[in-house]
Image (cartoon, grey):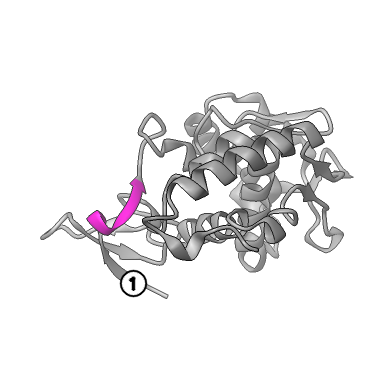
Amino acid sequence: MTKTIQSNNCVTFSKTKESFGGFSNMSTEYPIVVKGVVFPTSEHFYQCMKYVDHPQVQREIIGEKNPLLMKNKQKKHRGLIRKDWEDLKEVIMEITVHLKLVSHWVKFGNLLIETGEKEIVEISKKDSFWGMIPQVSNTGILVGENKLGEILVRFRDLIRTEGTRSELVTWNPDHQFRIMFNGEFMEGMKVQEKVQEVGSRSFDYLIKKSAAHYPQYGLAA
C-alpha cells in the first residue's frame, strides 16, 4: 500500500557509503556466504534466486563482483526468470535480509538497532515498491510502499527482545521456495555461539542505552 511520510521522521539511505548505507542490498560490506558459495552482496543473492532453473545465469551473476554492473547485465536474461517470482519476491527479500543478518550478526544487527524507533526508508529515483520516491515539488516528502524498509523494521523489532532474537540465529530453508544455487537446494546457516554471545551483549547495551528515549523497546523480562 502506497504511503506518504516526511523524510525527517525516518532513517533514510540511498548510497552505500552513507551512515546507514549498509541497509542497501548493493553494499559490498555485507557479503553472504552459504555453505561455501560467496554472494558478493545481498543483491547478488536476491538476483540469483530469480534464476533457480538456470545455473549458468546464477554463475554469471556471482562472477560479476560489482553489484550495479551485475544487476544491469542480468536484465538480458529476464525471459528466464522463474514463473513464480512475483508471488515470491517479498518472501525471497525477507530470506535475503535474514541471511545478511546471520552472516553479519553483530555488525548488521547493531546497524538495525541504531535506527531507534524510526521507519527505515531507501530513497529511490524510480523504485516506489521496495523504497520511496521524493516528491518533485517537495523532496522532503516521500511516497511509496517501502517494502524493504518494512522488512528491515520487522527484523529490528525481533532483535530487540531476548525471546524473539533467538529465532533469528538460525536460517533453515523452506524447500517450497526453492532456494537453490547451481541446481542444488541451499542448506541452512546458524550464527556461531561465540558470535551470538558477543552480539547479544552488544544488542543489550544499545537497547539499554536508548531505553530512556524508547522505553517501549526495553528488554523483555
Task: Give x and y (percent) for residue 28.
Answer: 53, 28
Q: Is residue 202 visible?
A: yes
Look at 65% across and 33% down and name the residue there. Answer: 61
Q: Is residue 75 visible?
A: no
Locate residue 139 relative to residue 1 in the image: left or right: left
- Of 67 and 30, nearer the camera is 30
Look at 55% across and 32% down and name the residue there. Answer: 70
Residue 111 vs 212, above or below: the answer is: above
Element marked by disc 1: strand
Instruction: Give the residue at mark 1.
Output: 3
User: How many numbered discs sit on the rendered protein?
Assistant: 1
Residue 30 vs 200, above or below: the answer is: above
Task: Give x and y (percent) for residue 171.
Answer: 78, 50
The magenta span reads 7-12
Residue 100 vs 36, above or below: the answer is: below
- Of 106 and 43, nearer the camera is 106
Look at 53% across and 40% down and name the residue there. Answer: 110
Magenta span includes 179: no
Look at 56% across and 39% down and name the residue there. Answer: 108
Instruction: Name the quarter where the C terminus is drawn.
Output: bottom right
Task: Give x and y (percent) for residue 186.
Answer: 84, 44
Task: Give x and y (percent) for residue 49.
Answer: 70, 48
